[in-house]
Image (spheres, rainbow, N blue to C red):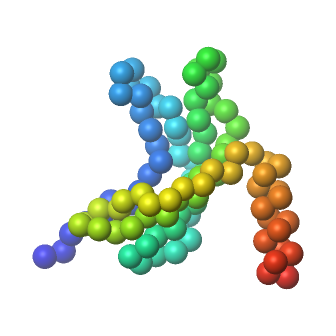
Amino acid sequence: MSMEIEEPTVEMTDMETGEQVIKELDKAVLTKGAWQTMMFLCQEKNAKTGEFGEPKVYLRRYQKAGGAFKARSKFNISGKAQAEAIIENLKKWYNI
């Protein structure tokens, strides 16, 4: 029997209000298989202003188990400066 496994998402809705608090703008699958690595471009809603903030990047590692993805590890890139520092180090380390 074939089983559909739903693709992971990081979108989140407030259970009390039903309002979206994390909006997924884009995603990329970096690795597939029993362990899947994904990168998400998201915006988080500011609780004070009710507005969505600057985009952030979430890196997530999932394990397929029992027909579902289970989150196993995560890392958030909080802004442009941190992203630029990561890019520069990766370029240096991999001679890109």
Q: Residue at x 54, y 56 (%)?
A: 74
Residue that lies at the very extreme toward the bottom in this rendered image? 95
Relative image position of residue 23 (x, y in whole percent): 53, 40
Q: Residue at x 52, y 37 (%)?
A: 22
Q: Which of the image's four quarters has the C terminus? A: bottom right
Residue that lies at the very extreme toward the top in this rendered image? 48
Regarding residue 15, the answer to whether it shows in the image is: yes
State whether residue 56 is above or below residue 35.
above
State whether residue 42 is above or below residue 94.
above
Relative image position of residue 72 (x, y in whole percent): 44, 60
State whether residue 66 is above or below residue 31.
above
Location of residue 48 (image quadrant): top right
Relative image position of residue 78 (x, y in whole percent): 70, 45
Taking the image as shown, residue 61 lies to the left or right of residue 77, namely: left
Numbered label tally: 0
Q: Residue at x 59, y 45 (%)?
A: 42
Q: Which of the image's four quarters has the N terminus? A: bottom left
Residue that lies at the very extreme toward the front in this rendered image? 73
Location of residue 84 (image quadrant): bottom right
Regarding residue 27, the answer to whether it shows in the image is: no
Location of residue 62 (image quadrant): bottom left
Q: Residue at x 23, y 66 (%)?
A: 66
